[in-house]
Image (spheres, rainbow, N blue to C red):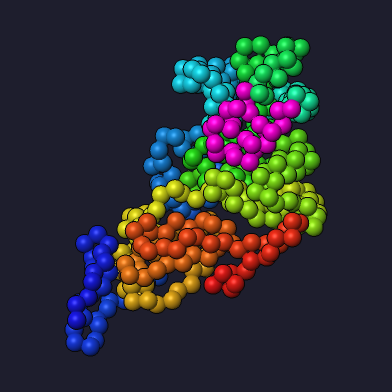
């Protein structure tokens, strides 16, 4: 009886069968090595972790040490960014005025954006009123419900820009400041509010909001605060969440104080209402990598050894059941995705999730992804995993 082989690099996932017995090598688990820690400012890292951190790409340098820039430096960065976007998007549109970047926010003094807060609030309220009076609300709703569509976003942005120009004409904003105000107001209406520049940066895997003034991001597996990013107050965070959740037909309220959702870009959001978190709201928005990671990829990233990968491949290929447990951001989904590549080609895979996150092996026989559904105010049926199965 012949046995197919699945390989990690040059190692067979299955070893040759001899008669009725199959010989397998089980991995040897070494005793964890306790590393000496080194005091590095406010953090403690092992020597190996410090060495790895030094090898991060140059784009990570700002993340490691975000020394506050001067007033003139920030303005110069925005001016340079404005010229670059103008050249890249000569026809204008929403992307042409996304002037603030995550790197700028990392370098900004904590109070730098405060100068715009009051006027952005006033301009946003006035613009929304004018959009309603001029019967442009449908354009805005279409953009909010289709945030990944450049067509809807640009159409809404041009309406916002035309109306906002009237407001800015009455203010003292000129030159780049004028365009920056347009960008900030548009983010409040069709973007992700004050965290919009952070979410546009693909290096950032997760944004955490612990109340209006504590914004954190995860980059390269490490968390850090971004002091220059703040919501005005809890009501501002709730307004942002109301808009985000309404686009996916959900509502965060004291009746549903803990709410999960899948956003239009397939990222996931979890929010806690101040009814449960008095100093909140608390929010976590997390995206998953677009790429399907193979077992070989995980071995190369030192997620586990080649021996363990070989052993897992034997078990999964033969149809063994397994359970994956782990904390937040420990790689459970990436590991499950990789495991789907180890099943036989004649096996049909079915995925059942609370929120669609998995990206199974594209070459396998996979049923259309399914997710559970909670009850809602529209009296839609609650769907549990046991019912789908």
Q: Can residue 165 be seen by looking at this rendering?
A: yes
Where is 224 relative to 20, above or below?
A: above
Q: Position of residue 214 (x, y in %)?
A: 69, 42
Left or right placement of residue 292 versus residue 178 in this view: left
Q: Quadrant of residue 353?
A: bottom right
Q: Can residue 193 be seen by looking at this rendering?
A: no
Q: Position of residue 16 (x, y in %)?
A: 20, 77
Q: Quadrant of residue 389?
A: bottom right
Q: At x 66% / y 23%, what residue is drawn?
A: 159
Magenta stretch, main secondary structure class: helix
Front-most of residues 122 and 219 = 122
Left or right placement of residue 313 versus residue 137 in this view: left
Q: Position of residue 127 (x, y in %)?
A: 74, 25
Q: In what quadrant of the picture does the N terminus appear?
A: bottom left
Left or right placement of residue 177 versus residue 314 in this view: right
Q: At x 62% / y 23%, what residue is drawn?
A: 158
Q: Position of residue 241 (x, y in %)?
A: 71, 44
Front-most of residues 209 and 343 = 343
Based on the picture, tell me whether residue 150 belongs to the magenta stretch.
yes
Bounds of the magenta segment: 135-158
Left or right placement of residue 171 versus residue 326 in this view: right
Q: At x 41% / y 34%, what residue is drawn?
A: 58
Q: Which residue reaches farthest bottom?
A: 20
Based on the picture, tell me whether residue 377 belongs to the magenta stretch.
no
Front-most of residues 310 and 239 = 239
Q: At x 72% / y 31%, what residue is drawn?
A: 137
């Amino acid at each position: 009886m012949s046995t197919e082989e699945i390989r990690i690099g040059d190692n067979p996932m299955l070893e040759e069968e001899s008669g009725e017995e199959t010989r397998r090598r089980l991995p040897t688990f070494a005793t964890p090595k306790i590393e000496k820690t080194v005091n590095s400012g406010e953090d403690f890292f092992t020597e190996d972790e410090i060495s790895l951190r030094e090898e991060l790409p140059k784009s990570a340098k700002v993340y490691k040490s975000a020394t506050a820039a001067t007033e003139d430096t920030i303005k110069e960065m925005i001016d340079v960014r404005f010229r670059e976007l103008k050249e890249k998007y000569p026809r204008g549109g929403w992307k042409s005025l996304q002037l603030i970047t995550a790197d700028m926010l990392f370098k900004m003094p904590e109070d730098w954006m405060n100068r715009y807060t009051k006027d952005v609030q006033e301009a946003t309220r006035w613009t929304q009123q004018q959009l309603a009076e001029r019967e442009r609300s449908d354009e805005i709703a279409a953009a909010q419900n289709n945030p990944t569509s450049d067509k809807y976003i640009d159409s809404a942005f041009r309406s916002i820009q035309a109306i906002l120009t009237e407001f800015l004409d009455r203010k003292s904003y000129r030159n780049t400041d004028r365009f920056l105000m347009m960008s900030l107001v548009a983010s409040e209406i069709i973007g992700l509010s004050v965290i919009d520049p952070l979410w546009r940066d693909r290096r950032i895997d997760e944004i955490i909001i612990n109340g209006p003034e504590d914004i954190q991001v995860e980059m390269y597996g490490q968390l850090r605060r971004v002091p220059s990013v703040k919501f005005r107050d809890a009501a501002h965070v709730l307004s942002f969440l109301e808009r985000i959740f309404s686009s996916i037909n959900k509502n965060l309220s004291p009746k549903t104080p803990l709410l999960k959702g899948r956003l239009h870009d397939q990222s996931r959001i979890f929010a806690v209402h101040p009814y449960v978190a008095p100093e909140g709201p608390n929010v976590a928005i997390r995206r998953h990598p677009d790429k399907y990671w193979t077992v070989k990829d995980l071995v190369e990233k030192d997620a586990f050894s080649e021996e363990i990968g070989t052993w897992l491949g034997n078990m999964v290929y033969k149809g063994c059941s397994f359970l994956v447990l782990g904390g937040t951001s420990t790689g459970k989904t990436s590991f499950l995705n990789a495991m789907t590549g180890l099943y036989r080609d004649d096996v049909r895979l079915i995925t059942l999730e609370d929120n669609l996150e998995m990206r199974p092996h594209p070459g396998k026989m996979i049923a259309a992804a399914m997710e559970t559904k909670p009850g809602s105010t529209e009296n839609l049926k609650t769907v549990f995993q046991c019912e789908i199965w």
